[in-house]
Image: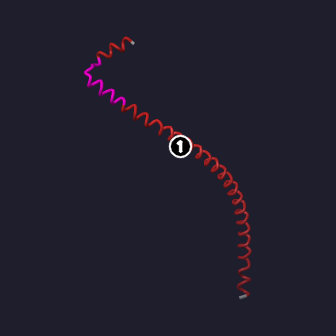
């Protein structure tokens, strides 16, 4: 058993050397990852701020639209009523063109 351990000693030295090299690489890559992670967190915060601003704008537009839709519906209903009155009174569009020319 001692003999086997002595034969494995060079392999152990090589493995230890490779491990040290890998640790250096891992340490360097960990620093790179941390730097990139910080940058991504900053970009994420900026994106969240922009998303919040966009959401606020969306809500404002939806509120304005909620106010405008009833007015639009009322105007369309009035237009429909106006069309019905014109057609039922027997007026022709020729009479209106003369009136518009005067204006």
Q: What's the image's color scheme? A: secondary structure
Residue at x 64%, y 50% (from the top left corner): 45
The crowd level at tag 1 (other Cα within 10 Å; few <14, some 14-19, many 20+) is few
Residue pointed to by mark 1: 59
Relative to 90, say whether 80 is above or below: below
Residue at x 40%, y 31% (from the top left corner): 75
> In the depicted view, which residue is nearer to us: 3 or 88?
88
**Magenta span has 90?**
yes
Residue 96 image offset from top left, x and y in percent: 32, 17
Magenta stretch: give its range. Answer: 78-93
Residue at x 60%, y 45% (from the top left corner): 50
Element class at badge 1: helix
| Image quadrant where one finds the N terminus | bottom right
Relative to 1, say whether 8 is above or below: above
> In the depicted view, which residue is nearer to us: 11 or 89?
89
Residue 34 image offset from top left, x and y in percent: 69, 57
Direction top: furthest residue:
102
Q: Main secondary structure of the magenta part?
A: helix
> In the depicted view, which residue is nearer to us: 43 or 85?
85
Residue 36 image offset from top left, x and y in percent: 67, 54
**Magenta span has 39?**
no
Residue 65 image offset from top left, x and y in percent: 48, 38
Residue at x 53%, y 43% (from the top left corner): 59
- The answer to which image quadrant residue 103 occupies is top left
Direction bottom: furthest residue:
1
């Amino acid at each position: 058993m001692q003999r086997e351990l002595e034969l494995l000693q060079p392999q152990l030295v090589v493995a230890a050397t490779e491990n040290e090299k890998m640790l250096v690489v891992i340490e360097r890559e960990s620093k790179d990852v941390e730097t990139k992670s910080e940058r991504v967190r900053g970009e994420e915060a900026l994106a969240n701020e922009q998303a919040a601003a966009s959401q606020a704008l969306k809500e404002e537009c939806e509120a304005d639209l909620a106010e405008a839709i009833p007015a639009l519906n009322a105007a369309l209903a009035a237009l429909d009523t106006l069309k019905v009155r014109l057609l039922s009174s027997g007026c022709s569009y020729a009479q209106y063109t003369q009136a518009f020319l005067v204006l």
